[in-house]
């Protein structure tokens, strides 16, 4: 039975894929108000049994068995399997949240969006940084961002290395940039190198938009320390956001500052400490998915938005391959 047929009762939820991220999907959903957690499915029976035991839930023997018992699911399988699993869910008439990136190709992502649209089903994409505390706190003050500097650096770990760092990490920030700027991309220049894997492990991209905005985005999975910083410049001031800590500051130009006989920056700039309610971003994302399935609000990160982020990531990847550094390596 679809979620539409259950009215406002508890939604039966399940999780497909119980790796590092899928485990946390299950951990949060099993205790979420308005959710009746129906269990998990993982292609690895040993992993499924371990997670089921740790979370005191049911590990179903097949994807079909799980889908028989749910109104909606989240999918956290490896990226190359997103399309096959997502289609299997949608073709059963079941709403789905698919972790980012939506697919490993734009054509695959567009197919998921098309099937969801044809069947009138919710398709949400797991770009969790939309729910970051610092981003939520900055939102009321954002106005025509013109320059964005984003650094996402992480120590090496095997998870996610089935794709380049652009699809593994940078795509988080590409989605944020598209949401913040809201203009067409006119130019992409990028460079990157593989270091510990066959894929690009560190990359930098300069993205220009039709409205004049520019974003400079760096992502690395071979750094010694973990950093997630977002800096935004706009006509009214400057934001410094620490996405890892969920904190931030806004340095806002005071009204009429041009006429002030100021001799120091502090005289024309007001410091606003950015605050938002404390909450786990993944929990907020899953709660938003439940509300969207119920029809209580629009999907926060739609399938179309997922396609846009993926298409930009592919443009970055193509620009890396076309860069002089790539040519020198070949």
Image (cartoon, rainbow, N blue to C red):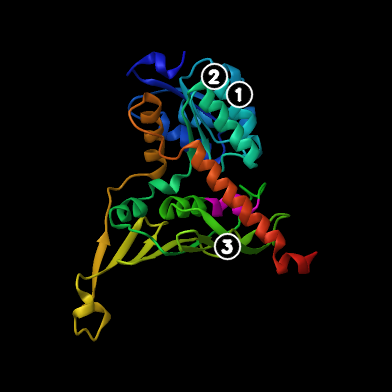
Residue picked out by circle 3: 205
**Residue 329: x %, y % from top left:** 77, 66
Mark nearest the camera among 2 and 3 is 3
Under tag 1, what secondary structure? helix
Q: CA distance from mark 3 to mark 1?
A: 35 Å
Residue at the far front in the pictured view: 210
- Pick whichever, 279 or 126, lies toward us: 126
Under tag 3, what secondary structure? strand
**Residue 171: x %, y % from top left:** 54, 51
**Residue 166: x %, y % from top left:** 60, 54
Report if the CB atoms under discs 1 and 2 are less than 8 Å apart.
Answer: yes
User: Was residue 167 drawn as part of the magenta stretch in this picture?
Assistant: yes
From where the camera sits, is residue 181 visible?
yes
Q: Residue at x 57, y 16 (%)?
A: 65
Please identify the quarter of the rendering in which residue 285 is found: top left
Label 3 environment density (alpha carbons within 10 Å; few <14, some 14–19, many ≥20): many
The tag earlier along the polypeptide, 1 or 2, is: 2
Q: CA distance from mark 1 to mark 2?
A: 9 Å
Give above or below for 35 relative to 163.
above
Residue picked out by circle 1: 88
Left-right relation of 131 to 310: left
Give above or below for 56 relative to 209.
above
Please identify the quarter of the rendering in which residue 28 is found: top left
Magenta stretch, residue numbers: 164-171
Mark nearest the camera among 3 and 1 is 3
- Pick whichever, 232 or 99, lies toward us: 232
Residue picked out by circle 2: 67
**Residue 252: x %, y % from top left:** 27, 67
The tag earlier along the polypeptide, 2 or 3, is: 2
Q: CA distance from mark 2 to mark 3?
A: 40 Å
The tag earlier along the polypeptide, 3 or 1, is: 1
């Amino acid at each position: 039975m679809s979620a539409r047929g259950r009215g406002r009762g508890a939604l039966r939820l399940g999780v497909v894929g119980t790796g590092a991220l899928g485990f946390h999907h299950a951990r949060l959903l099993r205790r979420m108000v308005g959710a009746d957690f129906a269990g998990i499915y993982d292609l690895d029976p040993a992993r499924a049994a371990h997670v089921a035991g740790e979370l005191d839930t049911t590990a179903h023997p097949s994807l079909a068995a799980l889908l028989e018992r749910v109104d909606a699911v989240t999918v956290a399988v490896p990226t190359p399997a997103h399309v096959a699993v997502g289609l299997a869910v949608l073709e059963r008439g079941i709403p789905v949240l698919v972790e980012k990136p939506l697919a490993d190709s734009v054509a695959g992502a567009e197919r998921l969006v098309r099937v969801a649209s044809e069947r009138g089903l919710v398709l949400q994409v797991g770009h969790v940084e939309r729910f970051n505390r610092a981003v939520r706190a900055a939102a009321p003050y954002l106005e025509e961002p013109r320059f964005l500097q984003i650094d996402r650096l992480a120590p090496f770990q095997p998870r996610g290395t089935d794709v380049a760092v652009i699809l593994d990490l940078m795509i988080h920030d590409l989605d944020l940039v598209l949401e913040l700027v809201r203009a067409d991309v006119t130019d992409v220049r990028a460079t990157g190198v593989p270091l510990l894997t066959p894929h690009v492990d560190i990359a930098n991209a300069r993205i220009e938009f039709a409205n004049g905005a520019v974003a400079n985005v760096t992502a690395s999975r071979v750094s010694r320390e973990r950093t997630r910083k977002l800096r935004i410049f706009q006509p009214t001031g400057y934001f410094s956001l620490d996405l890892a800590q969920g904190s931030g500051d806004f340095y806002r130009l005071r009204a009429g500052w041009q006429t002030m006989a100021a001799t120091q920056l502090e005289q024309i700039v007001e410091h606003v400490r950015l605050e938002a309610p404390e909450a786990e971003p993944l929990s907020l994302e899953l709660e938003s998915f439940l509300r969207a399935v119920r029809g209580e609000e629009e999907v926060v990160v739609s399938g179309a938005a997922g396609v846009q982020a993926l298409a930009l990531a592919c443009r970055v990847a193509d620009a890396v391959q076309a860069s002089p550094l790539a040519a020198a390596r070949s």
